[in-house]
Image: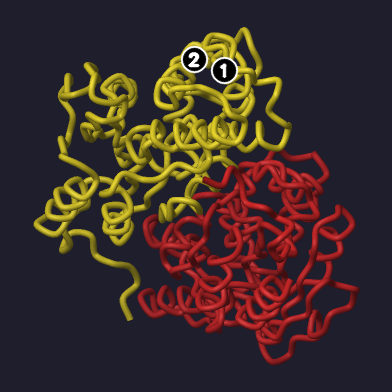
Chain colours: A yellow, B red
């Protein structure tokens, strides 16, 4: 009866956990949010460009987290920030948000819970799950990420939300708190993201890094994050390609 | 384009999330721990009754959490408590634990991460996952529960460990903190457990409850929790039966 596996005879996996930025990297927020905006506009007879509205709503995202990152505001989930940003976006675009009933407004705000994966996301994650612990490393909170996983069939092993670490990336606690809860040293955790700045923060804290380009995240006029701008451990075409690269590396030793 | 589903036309699910006590309810800790004890005994030539050792080790479990529940000790994970309890059990039984090298001792202590499900656990959870959010509501911490899920193929949607709520059941924060992170009111969450006391705590806080008997948890001499002793929402033979009852209830409206 073997007491414990002998690691010397087995190929060493590059990491134990592969974690993912979600918005943009795993799921297509622009299309999902625009669909919800379009449905509301249809029901209420509003004139609105749904894609433009989604992009403007998202433009408030990073600034909204800033006071929480710098400690001048207590932690609040993305449901709270998205709601504030929705009101601001409606004001900017002239959308008569006051006419939307409470349940519909909540449904619209929670469109961020109901986003679909990119075509490669579910197959790539499913393949990775056979070899690694997989999970989000996202600014989403537990409920949002859980609902998103149910909606999009994302086969996460574990969900550690921003409301668990009480930190928004690139706050170091978001990365290190997640690794700590997995009881893994940072170098045994890889972050996969479509955003170079996210990877730079992760790398500076000792995590391994994988870049996948998502040139359609913001639509055809996207100018940022079309290419890797740092020295990352893996550059992959998409999550299926990431799985192939990591699993070949693992099985080849 | 439908704006949002019309709940009135659909059967109402009894709850949104079905959460599980794990040790004893979902996994067979006695066999898994005894197997590890036996392997160590074989390697080191120790005389030990593995099942007896596992039962004694487990007997330290509830008392070890007590100082954390009552606030006289800071939160520590089950890895820490299991290690202390292992040393105490070795002392009681005369097992020469000092002869075990550090890596083997760690492997033995982490046998609690490598437990197998009861035969009905994976099929029952897999069925429930199609209709409900499923996850552990356990005294295990995130890393232990994640490793256990990988080992036993438990298809959890989300893992909220005791190190997230910083509370050991039946501390109310263990139940309510988990519901809060799922953004669900207690009555939309069901706890399934093989332990009446766990269900009593959950019920007193407003959660729904399901009892499954696990008459082999402690072996043939088990005298406790052979039957439901409270008024629980569901009494099921096992997790597959729980799935059948909840899903029939759901689809029948």
Q: Position of residue B140 (x, y in %)?
A: 60, 55
Q: Is residue A80 above or below residue B35?
A: above
Which residue extends farthest front?
A45
Residue corresponding to mark 1: A85
* Residue plotted at (36% across, 39% down): A20
Q: Residues within 10 Å of mark 2 (few under 14, many from 20)?
A: some
The kind of secondary structure element at disc 1 is: helix
Tag of residue A23: none
Task: Please indicate whether residue B181 sits to the left or right of residue A55 in the image.
Answer: right
- Residue B1: x and y, percent? 52, 45
Q: Residue A192, percent across and down?
A: 29, 36
In this rendered view, identify the residue nearer to me: B192 or B223: B192
Q: In this picture, is B183 found above or below B138? A: above
Direction bottom: furthest residue: B220
Residue B132 pos. (x, y %): 61, 62
* Tag 2 residue: A60
Q: Quadrant of the C terminus of chain B?
A: bottom right
């Amino acid at each position: 009866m073997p007491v414990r596996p002998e690691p010397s005879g087995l190929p060493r996996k590059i990491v134990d956990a592969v974690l993912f930025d979600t918005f943009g990297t795993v799921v297509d927020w622009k299309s999902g949010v625009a669909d919800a905006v379009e449905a509301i506009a249809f029901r209420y007879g509003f004139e609105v460009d749904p894609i433009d509205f989604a992009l403007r709503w998202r433009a408030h995202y990073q600034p909204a987290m800033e006071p929480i990152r710098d400690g001048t505001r207590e932690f609040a989930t993305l449901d709270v920030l998205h709601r504030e940003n929705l009101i601001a976006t409606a004001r900017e675009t002239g959308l008569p948000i006051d006419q939307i009933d409470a349940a519909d407004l909540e449904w619209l705000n929670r469109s961020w819970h109901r986003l679909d994966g990119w075509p490669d996301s579910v197959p790539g994650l499913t393949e990775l799950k056979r070899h690694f612990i997989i999970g989000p490393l996202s600014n989403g909170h537990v409920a949002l990420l859980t609902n998103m996983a149910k909606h999009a069939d994302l086969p996460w092993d574990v969900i550690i939300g921003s409301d668990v670490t009480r930190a928004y990336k690139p706050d170091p606690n978001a990365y290190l708190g997640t690794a700590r809860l997995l009881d893994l040293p940072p170098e045994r955790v890889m972050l996969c993201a479509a955003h170079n700045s996210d990877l730079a923060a992760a790398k500076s804290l000792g995590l391994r890094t994988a870049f996948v380009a998502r040139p359609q995240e913001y639509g055809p006029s996207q100018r940022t994050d079309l290419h890797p701008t740092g020295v990352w451990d893996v550059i992959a075409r998409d999550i299926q390609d990431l799985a192939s690269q990591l699993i070949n590396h693992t099985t080849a030793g």
